[in-house]
Image (spheres, helix red, strand yellow):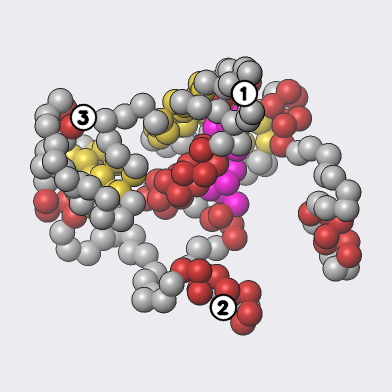
Amino acid sequence: MGMIANWGAHHIDIAQWALDMESSGPVRVRGRADFPKRRLWDAHGKLDVRMEYADGTLLRVTDDSVYPNGVRFVGDKGWIFCGRGSVKTMTNDPGAGGKHGRWRPLEASRKELIEGEVERPLARNPSNHHRIWLEGIRTRTPTHVSPETAHRTTTACILAYTAMNLKRPLIWDPAAERFVGDAEANATLSRPEREPYGVRRSLARAGMKL
C-alpha cells in the first residue's frame, strides 16, 4: 500500500493515542494520491488524506508539509509537534511562515505545553521494544501496545488507502468495521488468499478459526 501504511502506521497510532481512539477510528475519510501509471511499482507517491472522528476532530496525513517527519497537534492553547527521535529541532513555527533551525523530538508553541506530567502517560520500559515484543511471544505477557491498538492503527491506514484509491469520500462505521452503504468500498476489505498461505489456512492448521 505504500507509505500510508508504512510511516502512516508510525504516526497515526500516536494521533489516535492522543485522541483516545485506540479502540475505535475515524468515521469519515477522503484523500488523494499520485499513483504511477507506467513504473515498476504500483504504490502511491505524494498523498493528502483527511480523516474525521466522531467528535469532529480532524486528522490530516500528508507528505506536502513544511514540517519534518512527525505529528503536529493543534488546539485552543497552541500546538505541539512530536518528531521521530532527535532528527531536527525548530526555533519557531514554519507553518506560520517563519524560518526554522533544528528540530527537537518534542516542540511546542509555548514551552509550558510540554512541561510537567501529561494527562495520558505512556508505559515506559528501558528495554528495546523489539525485545519486549519477543518476550511477549515467549512468555505471553502483554506488550505495551495491545493487538487491538495495532489493528485500529492498521485499519486507519487501510481506510486512507481505500479513499485514495477510489478517489472519493467514504463513511466508516468503526464499531461494525464496515463502510456505510458502500458495496464497492466494502469489497476492498478482503481479497483471495494465495495457497498455501493465508490467515484462515494458518489458523486451521493450528486448530483455530476466526
Residue type, label 2: Glu
Q: Nearer the viewer, mark 1 or mark 3?
A: 1
The magenta region covers 151-162
Looking at the image, is 147 positioned above or below residue 128?
A: above
Residue type, label 3: Gly
- Which disc number belongs to residue 95? 3
Q: Residues within 10 Å of mark 3 (few under 14, many from 20)?
A: few
Q: Secondary structure at mark 3?
A: helix
- Left or right, 197 with respect to 110, comes to right
Q: Residues within 10 Å of mark 1 (few under 14, many from 20)?
A: few
The disc, 3 or 2, on the residue closer to the chain's N-terminal end is 3
* Residue 152 painted magenta: yes
- Which disc number belongs to residue 80? none
Residue type, label 1: Arg
| Residue carrying label 1 | 39
* Nearer to us in this view, 133 or 178: 133
Q: Position of residue 145 (x, y in %)?
A: 50, 63
Quadrant of residue 86 within the rendered picture: bottom left
Residue plotted at (41% across, 30% down): 62
Q: Position of residue 76 (x, y in %)?
A: 21, 37
**Cα distance in 3D space between marks 1 and 3:** 34 Å
Q: Is residue 25 visible?
A: no
Residue plotted at (17% across, 51% down): 113
- Left or right, 71 with respect to 207, comes to left
| Residue carrying label 2 | 135
* Nearer to us in this view, 145 or 131: 131
* Residue 163 painted magenta: no
